[in-house]
Amino acid sequence: MSGTAAIETQALLDFLGGRKTLGLGPRAQADFVGLVRHGLPYQALRAVTDSLLLSLKDLQGTLQLSPRSLQRRKTARLSPLESERILRLARVAVHATQVLGDRAAALDWLSTPNRALSGEQPIHLLDTDVGTNEVMEVLDRILYGVYS
């Protein structure tokens, strides 16, 4: 695994609550497949919301999670679909942090309407793969110095 991939994997692991939440957990990006299929623990969701300084209510639309489902998940693992959505959000947040230099700048960027995204807040586009890809493309353009 390249150094960049290892750093990104570790950052993603930390964002999801680290080894304390995920156990021995992933050592490579591909290892997240099994975690998602098995379902992330509820604590991973809490770690992501804490890292983003957002409440579960703030993320309900982005993650398409109902309050009732979230209540049930407190004592169980998240479904694979819910886990996928949480991992998607965490991956974007980690990438934004790496591109923009720190978590505060990433959080600000994710919550600010962006002209390159038709005036949408990037975080509100993460409910679909298409929207997520658009957000990641804008971040890559920023990374490579392309005007966005």
Image: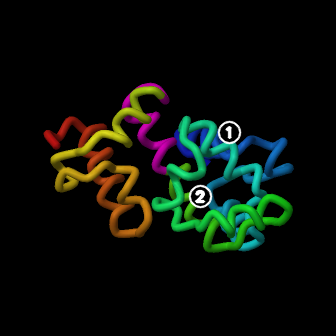
User: Horizontal and vertical percent for residue 106?
Assistant: 41, 34
- Characterize the local packing of mark 2: few (<14), some (14-19) or many (20 or more) Cα atoms within 10 angstroms: many
Residue under numbered circle 2: 86
| Front one among 145 and 125 | 125
For the point 16% across and 47% down, the residue is 115
For the point 44% across and 65% down, the residue is 127
Residue under numbered circle 1: 14
- 3D distance between C-alphas at marks 2 and 1: 13 Å
Q: Are marks 2 and 1 in contact (CB under 8 Å)?
A: no
Q: Tell me, yes or no, whether the highlighted magenta stretch contains residue 125.
A: no
For the point 22% across and 45% down, the residue is 114
Image height check: is 118 above or below 139? below
* Amino acid type indicated by mark 1: Asp
| Front one among 31 and 16 | 16
Q: Tell me, yes or no, whether the highlighted magenta stretch contains residue 99.
A: yes
The magenta stretch is: 92-103
Q: Earlier in the sequence, mark 2 or mark 1?
A: 1
* Amino acid type indicated by mark 2: Ile
Image height check: is 133 above or below 48? below
Q: Is residue 36 left or right of residue 102?
A: right
User: Horizontal and vertical percent for residue 129?
Assistant: 41, 69
Q: Examine the residues drawn in magenta and state their main secondary structure.
A: helix
Disc 2 is placed on an element classified as helix
Asked where in the image residue 108 lies, by quadrant, the reply is: top left
In front of the other: label 2 or label 1?
Answer: 2
Q: Is residue 140 left or right of residue 71?
A: left
